[in-house]
Amino acid sequence: MQLDETDLMILRVLQENGRLSFRQIADRVKVSVPTISNKIANLEKAGVIRGYSAMLDPERLGEMSVMISVKARPSELKGVAEKLAKDEHVRGAYLLSNCKLLLSCTFPEAYQINDFISRLGEIPEILDYEMGNVIGAIRDDPRAIVQPGLSTVLECVYCKEPFKGAGVKVKLEGKDYHVCCPVCAKGLQEKFAKIKEKA
Protein backbone atom coordinates (compact mmCIF):
# COMPACT_ATOMS: atom_id res chain seq x y z
CA MET A 1 0.00 0.00 0.00
CA GLN A 2 1.56 3.28 -1.15
CA LEU A 3 1.30 6.03 1.48
CA ASP A 4 0.02 9.37 0.20
CA GLU A 5 0.96 12.83 1.50
CA THR A 6 -1.97 12.85 3.95
CA ASP A 7 -0.84 9.50 5.42
CA LEU A 8 2.69 10.89 5.85
CA MET A 9 1.43 14.08 7.52
CA ILE A 10 -0.71 12.02 9.91
CA LEU A 11 2.27 9.84 10.83
CA ARG A 12 4.47 12.89 11.45
CA VAL A 13 1.82 14.49 13.68
CA LEU A 14 1.35 11.24 15.64
CA GLN A 15 5.11 10.79 16.11
CA GLU A 16 5.29 14.29 17.58
CA ASN A 17 2.28 13.78 19.85
CA GLY A 18 0.28 10.55 19.97
CA ARG A 19 -2.22 12.06 22.43
CA LEU A 20 -3.94 14.35 19.93
CA SER A 21 -7.61 13.81 19.13
CA PHE A 22 -8.81 13.10 15.59
CA ARG A 23 -10.12 16.68 15.45
CA GLN A 24 -6.73 18.13 16.46
CA ILE A 25 -4.98 15.95 13.87
CA ALA A 26 -7.53 16.98 11.22
CA ASP A 27 -6.88 20.67 12.01
CA ARG A 28 -3.12 20.20 11.55
CA VAL A 29 -3.37 18.07 8.40
CA LYS A 30 -6.19 20.20 6.92
CA VAL A 31 -8.59 17.33 6.14
CA SER A 32 -11.89 16.17 7.64
CA VAL A 33 -12.19 14.19 10.87
CA PRO A 34 -13.76 11.17 9.04
CA THR A 35 -10.76 11.16 6.66
CA ILE A 36 -8.38 11.08 9.66
CA SER A 37 -10.39 8.31 11.31
CA ASN A 38 -10.42 6.21 8.12
CA LYS A 39 -6.73 6.73 7.34
CA ILE A 40 -5.59 5.95 10.89
CA ALA A 41 -7.74 2.79 10.89
CA ASN A 42 -6.08 1.69 7.62
CA LEU A 43 -2.58 2.46 8.96
CA GLU A 44 -3.34 0.46 12.11
CA LYS A 45 -4.75 -2.44 10.06
CA ALA A 46 -1.61 -2.46 7.86
CA GLY A 47 0.57 -2.59 11.00
CA VAL A 48 2.25 0.75 10.28
CA ILE A 49 0.86 2.12 13.56
CA ARG A 50 1.51 -0.59 16.16
CA GLY A 51 0.10 1.29 19.14
CA TYR A 52 0.23 4.45 21.22
CA SER A 53 2.30 4.92 24.34
CA ALA A 54 4.05 7.51 26.47
CA MET A 55 7.85 7.69 26.18
CA LEU A 56 9.10 7.22 29.73
CA ASP A 57 12.67 7.91 30.87
CA PRO A 58 13.85 4.84 32.83
CA GLU A 59 16.80 6.70 34.38
CA ARG A 60 14.42 9.36 35.77
CA LEU A 61 12.50 6.48 37.35
CA GLY A 62 15.68 5.19 39.02
CA GLU A 63 15.99 2.20 36.69
CA MET A 64 19.08 0.94 34.85
CA SER A 65 19.23 0.33 31.10
CA VAL A 66 21.60 -2.19 29.56
CA MET A 67 22.41 -3.10 25.95
CA ILE A 68 23.38 -6.73 25.38
CA SER A 69 24.74 -8.18 22.15
CA VAL A 70 24.10 -11.93 22.00
CA LYS A 71 25.84 -14.27 19.54
CA ALA A 72 24.32 -17.62 18.57
CA ARG A 73 24.50 -20.04 15.66
CA PRO A 74 22.56 -18.67 12.65
CA SER A 75 20.08 -21.57 12.74
CA GLU A 76 19.37 -21.01 16.45
CA LEU A 77 19.35 -17.20 16.60
CA LYS A 78 15.61 -16.71 16.01
CA GLY A 79 14.71 -19.30 18.66
CA VAL A 80 17.03 -17.61 21.18
CA ALA A 81 15.50 -14.22 20.29
CA GLU A 82 11.93 -15.50 20.78
CA LYS A 83 12.87 -17.04 24.13
CA LEU A 84 14.58 -13.89 25.43
CA ALA A 85 11.92 -11.50 24.08
CA LYS A 86 9.43 -13.02 26.55
CA ASP A 87 11.47 -11.75 29.52
CA GLU A 88 9.88 -8.69 31.17
CA HIS A 89 13.25 -6.90 31.35
CA VAL A 90 13.79 -7.08 27.58
CA ARG A 91 12.30 -3.86 26.19
CA GLY A 92 13.60 -4.30 22.64
CA ALA A 93 15.01 -7.28 20.72
CA TYR A 94 16.60 -6.81 17.29
CA LEU A 95 17.95 -9.52 14.97
CA LEU A 96 21.13 -8.27 13.31
CA SER A 97 22.69 -9.36 10.02
CA ASN A 98 25.91 -10.55 11.71
CA CYS A 99 24.18 -13.48 13.46
CA LYS A 100 23.73 -11.43 16.61
CA LEU A 101 20.80 -10.33 18.64
CA LEU A 102 20.75 -6.87 20.24
CA LEU A 103 18.73 -6.61 23.43
CA SER A 104 17.68 -3.38 25.08
CA CYS A 105 16.96 -4.22 28.72
CA THR A 106 15.76 -2.25 31.74
CA PHE A 107 16.17 -3.32 35.35
CA PRO A 108 14.51 -1.61 38.34
CA GLU A 109 17.12 -3.13 40.71
CA ALA A 110 20.86 -3.76 40.13
CA TYR A 111 20.75 -7.41 41.34
CA GLN A 112 18.30 -8.21 38.52
CA ILE A 113 21.07 -7.63 35.96
CA ASN A 114 23.12 -10.45 37.49
CA ASP A 115 20.05 -12.73 37.55
CA PHE A 116 19.43 -12.02 33.87
CA ILE A 117 23.09 -12.67 32.93
CA SER A 118 22.92 -15.97 34.85
CA ARG A 119 19.86 -16.96 32.79
CA LEU A 120 21.78 -16.12 29.58
CA GLY A 121 24.51 -18.54 30.70
CA GLU A 122 21.92 -21.31 31.03
CA ILE A 123 20.87 -21.10 27.38
CA PRO A 124 23.14 -23.56 25.52
CA GLU A 125 22.47 -22.00 22.08
CA ILE A 126 24.18 -18.74 23.15
CA LEU A 127 27.84 -18.77 22.10
CA ASP A 128 28.86 -15.39 23.50
CA TYR A 129 27.49 -12.06 24.70
CA GLU A 130 28.68 -8.53 25.44
CA MET A 131 26.99 -6.11 27.80
CA GLY A 132 27.20 -2.39 28.43
CA ASN A 133 25.28 -0.16 30.83
CA VAL A 134 23.57 2.86 29.31
CA ILE A 135 25.08 5.88 31.08
CA GLY A 136 23.22 8.49 29.04
CA ALA A 137 20.94 8.80 26.03
CA ILE A 138 22.27 11.28 23.47
CA ARG A 139 19.39 10.58 21.09
CA ASP A 140 16.38 8.30 21.52
CA ASP A 141 13.97 8.96 18.64
CA PRO A 142 11.35 6.61 17.24
CA ARG A 143 13.01 4.30 14.66
CA ALA A 144 10.65 5.09 11.74
CA ILE A 145 11.55 7.99 9.44
CA VAL A 146 8.48 9.47 7.75
CA GLN A 147 9.43 10.63 4.25
CA PRO A 148 7.82 10.87 0.80
CA GLY A 149 7.59 7.66 -1.23
CA LEU A 150 6.93 5.33 1.70
CA SER A 151 4.86 2.22 1.16
CA THR A 152 3.88 -0.46 3.61
CA VAL A 153 5.43 -3.91 3.77
CA LEU A 154 2.57 -6.36 4.21
CA GLU A 155 2.61 -10.05 5.06
CA CYS A 156 0.93 -12.32 2.54
CA VAL A 157 -1.97 -13.98 4.35
CA TYR A 158 -1.38 -17.17 2.33
CA CYS A 159 2.40 -17.81 2.18
CA LYS A 160 3.26 -15.49 5.13
CA GLU A 161 6.10 -13.84 3.16
CA PRO A 162 6.53 -10.03 3.38
CA PHE A 163 5.87 -8.03 0.22
CA LYS A 164 6.04 -4.37 -0.74
CA GLY A 165 3.59 -2.57 -2.97
CA ALA A 166 -0.02 -3.28 -3.84
CA GLY A 167 0.14 -7.07 -4.19
CA VAL A 168 -3.24 -8.66 -4.93
CA LYS A 169 -6.41 -7.94 -2.96
CA VAL A 170 -8.79 -10.89 -2.52
CA LYS A 171 -12.33 -10.25 -1.28
CA LEU A 172 -13.85 -13.18 0.61
CA GLU A 173 -17.24 -12.87 2.30
CA GLY A 174 -17.01 -9.07 2.29
CA LYS A 175 -13.55 -8.94 3.86
CA ASP A 176 -10.34 -7.86 2.05
CA TYR A 177 -7.23 -10.03 2.22
CA HIS A 178 -3.83 -9.00 0.83
CA VAL A 179 -1.60 -11.56 -0.86
CA CYS A 180 1.71 -11.15 -2.67
CA CYS A 181 0.84 -12.64 -6.07
CA PRO A 182 -1.88 -14.27 -8.23
CA VAL A 183 -0.64 -17.77 -7.25
CA CYS A 184 -1.22 -17.02 -3.55
CA ALA A 185 -4.57 -15.40 -4.42
CA LYS A 186 -5.70 -18.62 -6.09
CA GLY A 187 -4.33 -20.71 -3.20
CA LEU A 188 -6.18 -18.58 -0.65
CA GLN A 189 -9.45 -18.83 -2.58
CA GLU A 190 -9.12 -22.63 -2.83
CA LYS A 191 -8.26 -22.93 0.87
CA PHE A 192 -11.22 -20.73 1.81
CA ALA A 193 -13.53 -22.81 -0.45
CA LYS A 194 -12.38 -26.06 1.22
CA ILE A 195 -12.95 -24.63 4.72
CA LYS A 196 -16.40 -23.44 3.68
CA GLU A 197 -17.18 -26.83 2.15
CA LYS A 198 -16.28 -28.63 5.38
CA ALA A 199 -18.42 -26.24 7.43
Image (cartoon, helix red, strand yellow):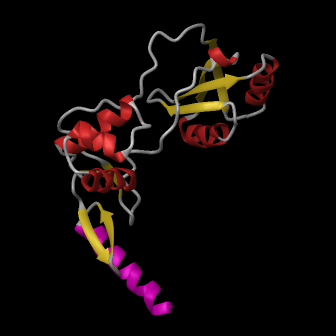
Whether residue 98 is in magenta: the answer is no
Q: Is residue 100 left or right of residue 160?
A: right
Residue 90, relative to residue 177: is it above or below? above
- How many labels were placed on the picture? 0
Position of residue 8 measured from the top left corner of the image (x, y, whole percent): 24, 39
Quick check: 170 above or below 108? below
Residue 112 appears in view: yes
- The part of the image, by quadrant, that contains residue 176 is bottom left
Q: Is 140 located above or below residue 171 in the figure?
A: above
The residue shown at (41%, 59%) is 160
Q: Return the residue nearer the eye: 181 or 169.
A: 169
Is residue 162 in view?
no
- Asked where in the image residue 38 lies, by quadrant, the reply is bottom left
Q: Is residue 13 left or right of residue 87?
A: left
- Predominant secondary structure in magenta? helix
The magenta stretch is 182-199
Q: In which quarter of the image is residue 62?
A: top right
Judge whether residue 197 is colored magenta.
yes
**Residue drawn at (47%, 44%), measured in percent from left and top?**
51
Residue at x 22% of width, y 46% of height: 3
Return the residue nearer the eye: 84 or 77: 84
Q: Which residue is drawn at 39% across and 51% down?
A: 44
